[in-house]
Image (cartoon, rainbow, N blue to C red):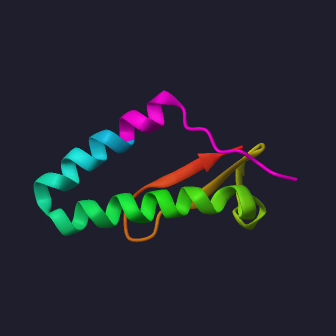
Amino acid sequence: MTWSLQFLPEVEDDVIKSYSWYKTKSRALVEDFLRIFYASAQDLPGNSLLYPKVYKEFRRRLIRRFPYAIYFA
């Protein structure tokens, strides 16, 4: 079965805000944030069952190195 990944507008807003904040700290940090976030997101459709359920059918993927998580169903 093939799953598709769609972000809610609120998620896109959070990523843009986080990007802007990390950009003020370090260029390398902002590049790492985007690379790790999108790599983590791309991994979800093929490996969604690897991540724990945290509420009903919602699962959570922690973002390595950053204080963020992707919640998905």
Vertical position of residue 51 compared to residue 8: above or below: below
Vertical position of residue 32 compared to residue 10: above or below: below
**What percent of the width, then of the height, locates residue 19?**
27, 49
Say if the magenta span includes residue 5. Answer: yes
Query: Which residue corresponds to the image point at 77% horizontal and 43% vertical from the top-left?
Result: 56
| Quarter containing the C terminus | top right
Which portion, as a residue range, is magenta?
Answer: 1-14
Query: Which residue corresponds to the image point at 43% horizontal and 55% vertical from the top-left?
Result: 68
Observer-nearest of 56 and 36 = 36
Residue 34 in view of the camera = yes
**What percent of the width, then of the height, locates residue 48?**
73, 59
> Among all residues in the image, which is located at the extreme right?
1
Q: Horizontally, is 60 left or right of 50 in the view? A: left
Q: Horizontally, is 32 left or right of 6 in the view? A: left
Observer-nearest of 68 and 20 = 20
Q: Horizontally, is 10 left or right of 54 in the view? A: left
Residue 62 in view of the camera = no
Query: Which residue corresponds to the image point at 59% horizontal and 47% vertical from the top-left?
Result: 71
**What percent of the width, then of the height, locates residue 64?**
45, 70
Say if the magenta span includes residue 62. Answer: no
Query: Which residue corresponds to the image point at 37% horizontal and 39% vertical from the top-left?
Result: 14
Vertical position of residue 57 compared to residue 65: above or below: above
Quadrant location of residue 29? bottom left
Q: How many labels does the image show?
A: 0
